[in-house]
Image (cartoon, rainbow, N blue to C red):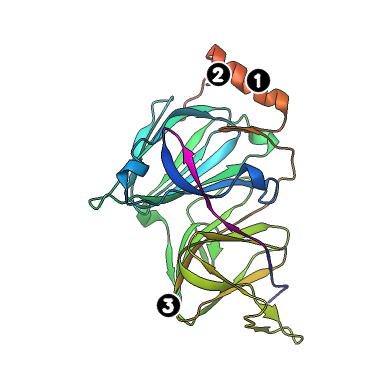
């Protein structure tokens, strides 16, 4: 089974105001650099109050990162400086590689009950790809495999692999894994994660025990003393190791499981732009002022 990963840090998301006045919950961000390398930020924008999200995120730039938007309820309408336009609906994912630069807007709107729910994860790009042409990957709900395990566990695979089933997103430099996992009560889920990868879990419903204590003989036995019961809107960052184990009691749990290969590169970050040096940041903002930020390339969605 390999060396079990333990919890190195537990974070509780903080309410923040972003865009034109969107109230959301930030699981981690700038203040946690470089703990989550290659990931930069995770925002939770679940709300049933339109006043908290309808102002949206008007036109703003990005360079040097990838933004991964996963919508559970409601919709996010988007448009960009290249002429792309569309809507991310319930169960869908948009994987945007900003690369050399893009200016876009994201405007959430609710379902028939006025609810919107989703998450945006920022992943860093390696220095060699920060100025690559921008691109979008729009992933429909029916393109994301749903794996049903015998014990009632449900896993949606955005990227990564469960058994012989791969997620639809491939060819990303950090080789990310992004899973949406639901465990019923009194269930245990074991998942291998190769050593050297950064890994975290973000709980989005219910509660569960994350982390187990290995017996001397190598078997994994549940130990409530060495485990932690985590609830909605909490995040567990794991130590290095080769696997994680999640166990539920009388309540089910649903969580996002994310891992990727760290870049180990310097990070220069200001607002929506993430580069490797202050000079690169200065260049980006100079180009914004001069109107030369957008490079000549065609990244329209097919």
Highlighted range, magenta: 9-20
Nearer the observer: mark 1 or 3; the answer is: 1
The image position of residue 273, as x and y in percent, is 59, 31
One can see residue 207 in this view: yes
Callout count: 3
**Corner quadrant of residue 229:** bottom right
* CA separation in Å, label 1 and label 2: 9 Å
Mark 2: few, some, or many residues within 10 Å (few <14, many ≥20)? some
Residue 261 is tagged as: none
Q: Label the magenta part by its dominant secondary structure.
A: strand
Q: Secondary structure at mark 2?
A: helix
The image position of residue 176, as x and y in percent, is 59, 53
Residue at (69, 51) in percent of width and height: 35
* CA separation in Å, label 1 and label 3: 52 Å
Is residue 249 in the magenta section? no
- For marks 2 and 3, the one nearer the N-term is 3
Q: Is residue 91 left or right of residue 42?
A: left
**Where is 216 relative to 66, above or below?**
below
Q: Nearer the viewer, residue 206 or 242?
A: 206
Q: Nearer the viewer, residue 50 or 170?
A: 50
Residue at (70, 46) in percent of width and height: 34
- For marks 1 and 3, the one nearer the N-term is 3
Question: Which residue is label 3 attached to?
Answer: 152
In what quadrant of the picture does the C terminus appear? top left
Question: Which residue is label 2 attached to?
Answer: 288
- For marks 1 and 2, the one nearer the N-term is 1
Q: Secondary structure at mark 1?
A: helix
């Amino acid at each position: 089974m390999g060396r079990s990963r333990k919890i190195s840090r537990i974070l509780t998301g903080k309410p923040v105001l972003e865009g034109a006045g969107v109230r959301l919950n930030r699981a981690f961000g700038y203040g946690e650099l470089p703990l989550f390398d290659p990931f930069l930020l995770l925002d939770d924008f679940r709300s049933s109050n339109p006043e908290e999200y309808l102002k949206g995120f008007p036109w703003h730039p990005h360079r040097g990162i990838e933004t991964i938007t996963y919508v559970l309820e409601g919709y996010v309408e988007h448009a960009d400086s290249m002429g792309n336009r569309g809507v991310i609906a319930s169960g869908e994912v948009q994987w945007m590689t900003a690369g050399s630069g893009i200016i876009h807007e994201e405007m959430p709107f609710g379902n028939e009950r006025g609810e919107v729910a989703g998450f945006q994860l920022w992943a860093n790009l390696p220095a060699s790809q920060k100025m690559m042409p921008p691109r979008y990957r729009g992933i429909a709900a029916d393109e994301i495999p749903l794996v049903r395990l015998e014990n009632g566990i449900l896993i949606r695979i955005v990227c990564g692999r469960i058994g012989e089933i791969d997620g639809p997103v491939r060819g990303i430099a950090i080789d990310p894994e992004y899973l949406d996992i639901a465990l019923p009560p009194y269930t245990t889920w074991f998942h291998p994660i190769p050593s050297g990868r950064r890994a975290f879990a973000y709980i989005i419903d219910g509660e569960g025990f994350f982390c187990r204590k290995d017996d001397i003989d190598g078997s994994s036995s549940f130990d409530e003393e060495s485990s932690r019961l985590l609830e909605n809107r909490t995040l567990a960052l794991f130590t290095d190791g080769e696997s994680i184990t999640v166990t539920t009691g009388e309540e089910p749990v649903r969580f996002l499981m994310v891992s990727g290969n760290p870049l180990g590169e310097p990070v220069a970050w200001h607002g929506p732009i993430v580069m490797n040096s202050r000079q690169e940041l200065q260049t980006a903002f100079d180009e914004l002022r001069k109107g030369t930020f957008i490079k000549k390339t065609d990244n329209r969605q097919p």
